[in-house]
Amino acid sequence: MTNSPEQTPTRAEIYNVTRLNREVRAVLEGSFPPMWVEGEISNFAQPASGHIYFTLKDEYSQVRCAMFRNRNQRLKFAPDNGMLVMVRANVSLYENRGEFQLIIEHMEPAGAGALQRAFEELKQHLHKEGLFDEKLKKPVPHMARHIGIITSPTGAAIHDILNILNRRYPAAEVIIYPTAVQGDKATDEIIHMLKLADQRDECDVLILARGGGSLEDLWCFNNEKLARTIHDCKLPIVTGIGHEIDYTIADFVSDSRAPTPSAAAELVSPDQRQLRSEIEQYRKKLGQRIQQFIREQQKHILYLEQCIPHPSRTIQMISQQLDHSIMQLQNALASSLDKRAKLVAELKFRLASYNPVHQLKMNLAHCDELKKRLSRSWKQIFEQQQLALSSLSRALNTVSPLSTLKRGYSIVNRIEDGAIIRTAGDVKAGDRINTRFSSGHIHSKVEKIYKDD
């Protein structure tokens, strides 16, 4: 026996599955406003699309959840199985399967303890990837000329940093990249400013700073995407977030962590008073080295003056030798004349003994001839010595500085210390100099210096 319906429905009254699921979805989405739901994550999955799918459960029930990519990119922690979370969601239906589900708009760990667990889990995850490796950290310049500051333009941190920089290192150029440092949009703004500063490449170092606050206040610095942006930045980054006891993920991945914003400013700026003291010490050492070098050069010049005799002394020595030669010649002539006189006397004595008049005349004539020859020999020797003396004098004049001066050259020295001036680089404007010529010298003052290229 078959049962037949009392009334056959019309075609318009018959639902197909797609229509049924669509209308049920509309009823669900229109009946329930966005609501907060707390539960434990299970069956967590994140495919290549970037969307997040998981089950939210409690002790007795469970519901499927979906959080699309444009929403989950704003998460401040890394969700995972077993984590207790609170979600703000819209009730909906997955039409293809007819499955009841929640569309998640926002998700956060449930309670402060959950935030700390989320922090530790992200810290451990990034540490395993090597983002905290000391070998990857860039050196922070000690005397940065251009300092970028990423922080709130109205917070206390920016005022503390600027006061420190103005006091310690006013020569530095400061570039402020304003951003929120708390709230839902803070992480995205910080990431944007980091990328902007890195792209512009107008700073030597960046300071990422914020004043103190609770874990929730500082949570925007515990974001995985922010950590990777800091890691990928080409510029060295110094963090000064919160107080000395506060640590964020940004601190671990940055190139250097300072306990406070003020300490971060001190880390990138030298103390100008210390710099001035060091410069003064270097100036004194340089002056001492220069004075020592001048003294050594003066000693060397004195040594050279002692080794190379002055031309006037050489002429004096030659003149003395010539006088000695003339005296020897005169003595030789006198001795020769004495001998000849003695010989004549002896001959006279012999002639007187024999009285030969003719022999006497011959001897007298021979004696006269000898006298003439002797006189000619003396003159010849004297002329030869004079010629030798003249030749030596000309040779000395050729190498003498006095001869060089006579050819139009001059010797220039600084009046203050007597130093010889060899090039234009040996003087400076305002120096008083002495110029010596072959006859006389002049004093002058350097007005302008022209150096050859």
Image: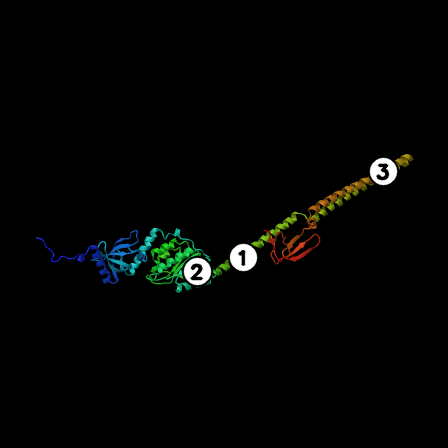
Q: How is the image coloured?
A: rainbow
How far apart are labels 3 and 1 at the CA level? 87 Å
Q: Specify whether 263 is left or right of 283.
A: left
For label 2, count other residues whose C-alpha is less than 10 Å away and answer few (under 14), some (14-19) or many (20+): some
Q: Answer yes or no: is residue 356 visible.
A: no
Q: Secondary structure at mark 3?
A: helix
Amino acid on which disc 2 is placed:
Ile
Whether 242 is drawn above or below 309: the answer is below
Closer-to-camera residue (308/264) = 264
Residue 369: give its label: 3
Q: Secondary structure at mark 2?
A: strand
Tell me which numbered mark, 1 or 2, is placed earlier along the sequence. Answer: 2
Closer-to-camera residue (429/294) = 429
Amino acid on which disc 1 is placed:
Arg
Please name the residue that numbered disc 2 is placed on: 175
Whether 449 is drawn above or below 338: the answer is below
How far apart are labels 2 and 3 at the CA level? 115 Å
Q: Specify whether 306 is left or right of 320.
A: left
Please name the residue that numbered disc 1 is placed on: 283
**Residue 304 % position (x, y):** 64, 48
